[in-house]
Structures are given as structure tokens and as C-alpha cells.
Amino acid sequence: MSILVNKDSRVLVQGFTGKEGTFHAQQCIDYGTNIVGGVTPGKGGQIHLGKPVFGSVQEAVEALQADVSIIFVPPAFSADAVMEAADAGIKVIICITEGIPVSDMMLAKKFVQKKGAILIGPNCPGIISAEEAKIGIMPGFVFKKGNVGVISKSGTLTYEAANQVVQAGLGITTAIGIGGDPIIGTTYIDLLKLFEEDHETKAIVMIGEIGGDLEIQAAKYIKENITKPVVAFIAGQTAPKGKRMGHAGAIIAGSKGTAKEKMDALEAAGVHVVASPAEIGKKVKDILG
Amino acid sequence: MNIHEYQAKQIFASYNIPIQDGITIEDANDAREAAEKIGGDFWVLKAQIHAGGRGKGGGVKFAKSIEEVEKYASDILGMTLVTHQTGPAGRLVKKLFIASGVDIKKEYYLGMVLDRTAEMPVMMASTEGGMEIEKVAAETPEKIIKVGIDPLIGFRAFHARKLASGLHLSAEQMKHFGKFAKALYEVYSNNDASLIEINPLVLTGEDTFLALDAKMGFDDNALYRHPDLKNMRDLDEEEPTELEASKYGLSYVKLDGNVGCMVNGAGLAMSTMDIIKLNGGDPANFLDVGGVASTETVAKGFEIILEDPNVKAIFVNIFGGIVRCDRIANGILEATEKIDVKVPLIVRLDGTNSSEAAEILKRANIKNIITATDLADGAQKAVKAAEGIRS
């Protein structure tokens, strides 16, 4: 089992014929993901990577019954692409693009929620359900199949954590990069709930970072609702205040959003918090035996 | 991106938000003419730098005569202003805003910022004008009135009423405040602002409101659609190395330690700093070279890190995904040919083809390259190397 996406997901690529879209769609196809086609406005009717291209998401959904979409369009057009996907009835929308204006996402997120769809990202590496579907830009081989779920704000740190879990002799059910922007479509809580319900997932790794309070909201939720063990790491323990650390959302505003306050809240909620990013895999192994 | 007070006031004025009349000068010899043009018999002179606390540092003066205006102008222009926000090095004052004195009845605070939890902008008002608002929030949070503004409906009359009632305004004052606040929301949303602060917002002798100060910051990701704002960017206010890095798509933040860090990905870059600290060292910087660590970005990364004379060792921590480690290893070797790296270079390459990468580095047999097997090993070796201990 896995959450959100699996081998039967019918995946559409928005921004299919662009450089990024082409490269990563091919990688996803090679992994075995069921990519059914793509969308590039003005290029409908073409065949790209052996799959049909449509001019709009609506046309692609009608022709292919696609239910998942991955977005590789430039930041100025991304919010529009997200809303187009939701409007066409796509259920899981994954937006990889970094650099989308906050005010665009504020509205796009509300629209997606109204349509009952799930948005992952933006500014994220995507989702991978090990050995079933890779709908993202992560290196697939790292994510060997197993029973650990991963939820993370980061890209390469997620690969690092997954690699540690695999090196410890375990594996991954599904790993989700939720994104490093100030407003993101899906937060820890929604995914913690899905992992709690997933029979195959035995433990959850949660990777956070400075900025905002999503980790603190998650801590409250875990305390009341999650029975499975959760291992957490928060990046940015040494980050200075008021400086943006790469991700648009990774900033300590005033004295809010520090790693310490997040680690303390998670610890108080019974989460296994590791101070060192090198201890994630080992900690999961200690708990699952 | 942040802008100066006088620039924020220009934007305010274009939305009919009342501001103090004023003139910005760069040469103290222009002070007399400016003061005469403004008129009156009482002026305020304010240093224009992107930092709060200017008054305490001596960057704000009140003048009761033209002679005082001239004296203070030559004092402030060219001074190095140190405030709690500039750090000990301070900031050179190149611009001075001269404005007419204002008849102040009462001072308030009015601000706007993104509420990340509610996922909408929030407008905040307080009767504690002129105070440090962070302090008010920490000590007397009940004195800050907040209204979240759903972008689907925009700023409405009830938002204004809620704020005005919290400020205990009279009916007449409330009318004027409502217009002011609505215009401020428009300034915020039309310009993709990330922050506006008016501290103080003043109630004048005529019972009208006026922005005595103004601070504005913007969403960098939205600047592409505001060419007029881009022109307001003052590069003198930015950290030169960070600016240089950003030109090459690198994200760099300077810190105080001696272990330089070069990492792919922001989360892993922050974690690398953390693990150096856990091993008893101090990171010299945050540096994200992006998901694809190419020869060019790695070379530029070395150059930027080595501009900091405190750096005694560099920890290159790369998790190779789709970009294979053997290619990154070759990139690092090429980069070291371009840039003369004299300090020990601790290289940890993990992920796709990591063993081939280790082989490439070993064969190259470069004296100051130390290979590491994983994150913990790399951090330990980097901290030791920075202390001058060869491992």
C-alpha cells in the first residue's frame, strides 16, 4: 500500500514539452510511472515521449481519464496551471515550480480546496510511492520499498533521510515533499492522517525547517491522533534570525518559527526528535527493530 | 526586497494616503533650500537606511531653525549609523529625508503582514505607537488588534470598524481612519507587499491620520510584475557577497564561523550547518548551489566562500540524485583548477554512483582534498580540519 498515488494513478504532465517537463517526465516513465499524456498550450495533437499532447487539461482529462497531474510550468503561470487542473477535475495536483508569488498561491489554494482536490507543493520535489509511481524530480533508486512514510519540506534532505532509512535495512511506503514556500497546498496534518490509516506504514519520518508554525500544528495533531511512531528532524537550528535560508518560507520572523520551539513542541507530543540529520535512519531502525 | 522610508511614502502618496511633506537630499549643501521649500518653522531630519531604531542611533533629529537643519544634515549625511538592526558595523547614510514638523495629538501603530497560519494578510493596529512593536506583542499582546483579510472579499468596512473600535476612536476619527486603512490594503495587495509598517501613525491636531514613518518589504517572487518597484532597489543596502551569489543563482548567507559549507538543496544546507555545530564547530555560511551542482556553480561557490578570511576548511556536502556523483566529482576537480583552494576541502558525495566518485577523487590525488563517507563523517572531518587537525 501507499498513499495518494500508486501504479494505477493516471498521470498528466503540465508543461510537458518544456525542457524540465521533458527531462523529468522521461525519468518518471523510466521508473514505471503511468504517465498517460501531457499538456502544453498551443501544442495539442502532437506526440511527445510517445504520449499524446493536449492544449488544455480539460481535453486531456476527457481523453485520458487522468486523475493526477504534475506541473513544470514557469512561476508566472503556475498558479493558473494549478487552478486549471483543479477545474478540470484532477484529484491530486503536484506543483514542482519554485518562485510563485505568495498572493497567487493564496487564491489558488482556496480554489483547489473548493474543488475538493489535493495540492502538493509548490516548490517541492513531488511524491514517490516506492516501486509504484514516481511523480516528481527525486532520484527513484534511493526509495526502496518498505514500511516507513516520509513527509518533508525539503528536497535533497528527503533523499538523504530516505537513503539513511534504506541503509538501515528498512524502506519507504510513500515519500512526499510538501514544499518550502510560505503557503503550501498540503501540510503535515493531512498526510499524517493518511499514513496513520495506511496499513503498510509502520513509522513516519517528518522533516521540518525554520519558519511558520506547521510543525507546531502537526505536534498538536500527533499528540491527539497518531498512534504510529514519528521521528522528526528540524533543519535550521543554527540559522540566524530574519534571514531567508534558501526556501522562501525558511525565515525566523521576530523570534517566531525557530527550530528549538518546533523541536520542543514535537518532543512534548511524544515524537522522537533527533538533533542530528545523520541520526534519522538510525532512530527509525531503533524504534522498528 | 525592502525599500527606503521616502520611497514607501511616495507609494503611499500615490494612493492618497496622507504623509508628511518632505524632500530627500544626498548633499548637506542642499539642506537649506529643501527646508525653505518645505516651509514652516519646525523640521524633522531622518537618515534613510533599511533598518529600524534610527532615532536611538542619532539618525533622526528635530530642527527649530534653518541653521539647525544645516547642522544636523551635515552631521547625519555620511555618518555610519549603528542600530539594533544594522549590526555593529552599522550602515553608511547616503540619503536624508527632511520633512515638516507635525502637530501630533496621539501616536498609533498600523501594519500589514502575511499571516502564514491563516494564509491571508493581516492588518494590525495598536494604541502603543512609537514603541517597538515586537516588544508590545511579547509583553501586552492584548494591545494589538488584528484583522485577517480574506483576499476573496478584500478590505471591507467591518474590518475598519473592528480596528477603529479597538483603538477607541471617535466617530469622526473612525471615518478618516477607515479611508486610510482601505488605501493601505490596496497599497499592500496591488504591489505584492510582504510587509508594511507605519510606526508611528499619528493623529494630528485636526483629527486626521498621517503616516509619520513608513517601512515596506515586497515578495521577491512577484517583482517581475512590478518593474516600477524594481527600480527602487538600493544595492548599497544589501550584503555584497549575498548579492554576488544571487547573480549566479546561488543562495548564500554569511555567518560567523570558520567551516565553509557548500551544499545542494536548502534543507540539506541548513542541516549541514546544524551538524557542524553539533560536532563542536561553527559554520561560516549557508550556501545552496541548487539541485544541479555543476562545475560553474561549484567554482563560483568556492570563490564566494573564500572571500571570507575566517574560513579554515570547506565542507562540500552533495547528495547526488539525478545528477550523478561521478560527474559532480569531476566538476569539483575542474573547479579546483579554476579557483585556488588553499584550505582543506572535505568532500562528501553520496547518492548515484558515489563509489565511482570516491575513486575519481582518490585518483586525482590532490593533497588538500579529504573524502568523507557520510554526513556525520564529513562533519567531523571538517570541524577537525578547521581546527588544524589533519584526520
Image (cartoon, helix red, strand yellow):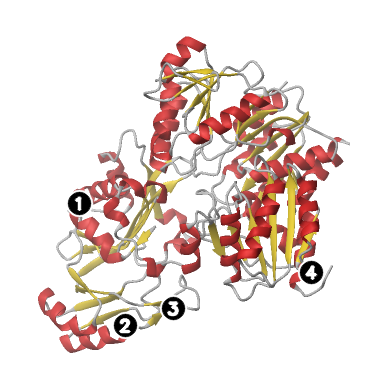
**Residue at left 37%, top 46%?**
B222
Q: Which residue is mark 2?
A: B76
Q: Earlier in the sequence, mark 2 or mark 3?
A: 2
User: Can the viewer see residue B108 in this picture?
Assistant: yes
- Image height check: is B158 above or below B165? above
**Residue at left 46%, top 44%?**
A99
Residue type, mark 4 in image: Lys
Q: Nearer the viewer, mark 3 or mark 4?
A: 4
**Residue at left 69%, top 43%?**
B324
SS at mark 1? Answer: loop
Mark 4 neighbour class, 10 Å CA radius: few under 14, some 14 to 19, many 20 or more: some
Q: Earlier in the sequence, mark 4 or mark 1?
A: 1
The image shows residue B126 at horizontal and vertical percentages of: 36, 57
Q: Which residue is mark 3?
A: B82
Q: Chain of mark 4?
A: B
Q: Are marks 2 and 1 in contact (CB under 8 Å)?
A: no
Tell if the residue under mark 2 belongs to the same chain as the one under mark 3: yes
| Horizontal side of residue A165 vs A101, given as left or right | right
Residue type, mark 3 in image: Val
SS at mark 2? Answer: helix
CA gap, disc 4 and disc 1: 58 Å
Q: Earlier in the sequence, mark 2 or mark 1?
A: 1
Tell if the residue under mark 4 belongs to the same chain as the one under mark 1: yes
The image shows residue A51 at horizontal and vertical percentages of: 53, 18
- Image height check: is B355 above or below B59? above
Q: Which residue is mark 1?
A: B15
